[in-house]
Amino acid sequence: MTKSSLIDSFRLNDEKEIERLYNSYRDQFVSWAIKTFNCDRDEAVEVYQQAIVIFYENVRSGKLDSIESNCKTYLFAIGKNKFYERLRELSRQNPLESTVMKSELQFEEEKFDHSEEKLRAVEEGLNKLGSPCREILIKYYYNKNSMEEIASLMDYKNGSTVKNLKYKCLQRLKKILQEEKIF
Amino acid sequence: MNIEKNKIDLVEDYLMGNLEGTVKSDFEKLLTEDEELQEYMEEFKLIFEGARFSGRKDLFNQLKEIEKNREDKPTKVVKFRSLYYGIAASILLLISTYFAFNYISQDPPSVVAESYFEPYPALYGAATRSSETEYTQLELGMQLYEVARYEESIEILESVVDPEKQEMINFYLGNAYLAIDDYSKSETIFKELINTGKIFSHDAKWYLAITYLKENETDKAISLLKDLTSYENDYAKKAKKMLRDVD
């Protein structure tokens, strides 16, 4: 088995797999963060959750095609960067330390070009669409599942069925957003 | 309808970074020249980002739920906030009912064991990797152990034959069996490590004590914990604390 096949399960957003990953390092991370950054438990947990999301998104985007470093190293490095970001925001200190931390491992956080207000409007549109459209669009655009994977995960006949459905869902979403004057 | 579908495919591929070379540059050129396509792209980009925004939010909610479930689990640790709020009201009650309270609120040994059990960290891995593209069976077994996929880890580690590392492999196997609640297997492995092991015998005593507590064999656990308190290591401190909880 190659290294990449080990992380395939994360690509499928398997809830159990994410829970296992979360529980594997949660306590170590929180203790380490409290000790190292003098933060409270809630903040440590919040940063740990951010680290898991960034790690997941990097795996899902194929940016960590193989685990050169182990999951734990990545999670702690991402966490470190998040804490330095917070400290920088708070104290507006020079970003030197943060830059050094970022050079440890290659990962990036996906940013959005649109405002949060607009993104929330799309989110509401997706909620209005409901099942199965919401799931299909999120699985495709966020989890980056292929049509075949979505067909298998959601019990559809094949990828073509999902692709047709996705097209219809997009048209419906577009109509909702036009009605709401988002476009 | 097909033209529309093809347009969606093309825009999607562009936004998802799947277009390369001349196809990508041709598309970008077209984008600068075709206002209708620009407008279409803008609309689609908003949908694309909105879906990713919602997916990320779903994942955060999933993690918050996992965290909440952890907090809901029975634990011996009293949360600071609860302690803070309740301290004034409960101090007299605690003093007057100390002995009765202590007796009634004693957790069963298996619950105590659960609150202390943390599988031994996977220290064998990245630094010892032998190849950039393939895992050895041992490395793969340890990677699976590290991400808490214990059943699969056991299946692989059981098949590894490496006399030099056998004691370490057995130690991790014992932990993995304990993590999946197969106490008879973990008990056998830890006993053997205590009797014959050179490196992991202290660690094995700690984990065997936890195994016994999980099996509600408190006397055997206490005997091992008392033994551990005589050493000068981290297990001694933990053993003393655990003894207070179970004795």
Image (tube, rainbow, N blue to C red):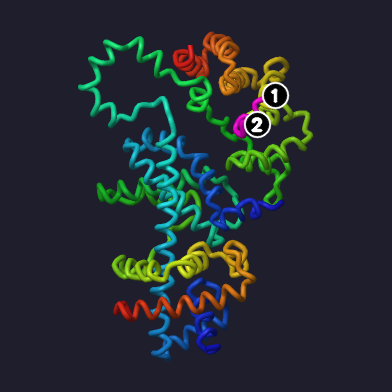
Residue A159 on image: x %, y % = 62, 72
Q: Are marks 2 and 1 in contact (CB under 8 Å)?
A: yes
Residue A81 on image: x %, y % = 40, 48
**Disc 2 with disc 1 on a shared chain:** yes
How many labels, in total? 2
Q: Nearer the viewer, residue B39 or B222?
A: B222
The Cα–Cα distance between marks 2 and 1, rounded to whole angstroms, is 9 Å
> Would you place residue A123 above or below residue B86 in this image?
below
Q: Is residue B94 left or right of residue B59?
A: left
Q: Nearer the viewer, residue B188 or A41?
A: B188
Q: SS of the residue at dot 2?
A: helix
Task: Specify the quadrant of the image occupied by residue B44.
Answer: bottom left
> Would you place residue A47 above or below residue A151 in this image?
above
Residue type pointed to by label 2: Tyr
Tag 2: Cα neighbours inside 10 Å, few (<14), some, or many (≥20)? many
Residue type pointed to by label 1: Ile
Residue B139 on image: x %, y % = 68, 41
> Would you place residue A125 above or below residue A179 in this image?
above
Determine which of the numbered discs, if any, sits on residue B177 in the image: 2
| The residue stretch that appears in magenta | B178-184
Residue A103 seen: yes
- The residue at the point 48 percent across, 17 percent down is B242
Determine which of the numbered discs, if any, sits on residue B189 in the image: 1
- The residue at the point 28 percent across, 51 percent down is A89
- The residue at the point 52 percent across, 82 percent down is B25
> Would you place residue A6 above or below residue B23 in this image?
above
